[in-house]
């Protein structure tokens, strides 16, 4: 792969963790917790019946309900952060990272051109991008740490 030194033209797609994993709004919190633990992920998109992102559940969201005696009755939609901020996978990496910082959030849902979930861009993905830029490794096939 050719080195890309034009940092302003880097897209979020290059650093997004593809996310085939998501849950429907009516999934039980127990199922959500097990899925996130099994896959060792910290963010999980929540979709509606059409597969469009309507929320995101983070480790922090789960921690806030983990001690509730009635948590088995909770659904993903009860715990999720609604209306997640989304970007298209062609969005600028710089703009996407700024959007996360400006909104004080740990992840963005990344959609493809059809509006379906392509993946998730996390603060860890942003740090990986920063490391590559600072090292001058942009565009090389370097393993990324994925943490969604």
Image: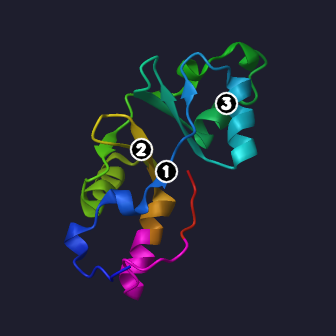
Mark 1 Cα within 10 Å, few/some/many (few <14, many 20+)?
Answer: some
Pointer 3: what residue?
Answer: 32
Protein image colouring: rainbow
Pointer 2: what residue?
Answer: 118
- The answer to which image quadrant residue 132 occupies is bottom left
Q: Position of residue 28 (x, y in %)?
A: 68, 20
Q: Position of residue 136 (x, y in %)?
A: 37, 87
SS at mark 1 in the image = strand
Which residues fall within the magenta stretch? 129-143
- Residue at position x 20%, y 70% in the image: 8
Callout 2 touching callout 3 (CB < 8 Å): no
Callout 1 touching callout 2 (CB < 8 Å): yes
Q: Residue furthest bottom?
A: 135
SS at mark 3 in the image = helix
Mark 2 or mark 1, which is nearer the start of the sequence? 1
Mark 3 or mark 1, which is nearer the start of the sequence? 1
Mark 3 Cα within 10 Å, few/some/many (few <14, many 20+)?
Answer: many
Mark 3 or mark 2, which is nearer the start of the sequence? 3
Quadrant the N terminus occupies: bottom left
What is the C-alpha distance between the residues marked 2 and 3? 20 Å
What is the C-alpha distance between the residues marked 1 and 2? 6 Å
Q: Residue furthest right?
A: 69
Q: Residue furthest front?
A: 1
Q: Is residue 95 left or right of residue 130?
A: left
SS at mark 2 in the image = strand
């Amino acid at each position: 792969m050719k080195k890309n030194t034009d940092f302003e033209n880097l897209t979020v797609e290059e650093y997004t963790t593809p996310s085939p994993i998501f849950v429907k709004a009516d999934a039980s919190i127990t199922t959500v917790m097990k899925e996130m633990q099994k896959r060792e992920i910290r963010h999980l998109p929540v979709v509606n019946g059409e597969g469009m992102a309507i929320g995101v559940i983070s480790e922090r969201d789960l921690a806030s309900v983990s001690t509730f005696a009635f948590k088995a009755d909770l659904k993903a939609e009860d715990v999720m952060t609604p209306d997640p901020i989304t970007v298209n996978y062609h969005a600028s990496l710089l703009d996407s990272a700024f959007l996360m910082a400006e909104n004080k959030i740990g992840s963005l849902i990344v959609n493809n051109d059809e509006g379906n979930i392509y993946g998730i861009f996390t603060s860890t993905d942003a740090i990986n991008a920063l490391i590559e830029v600072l090292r001058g490794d942009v565009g090389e096939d370097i393993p990324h740490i994925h943490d969604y």
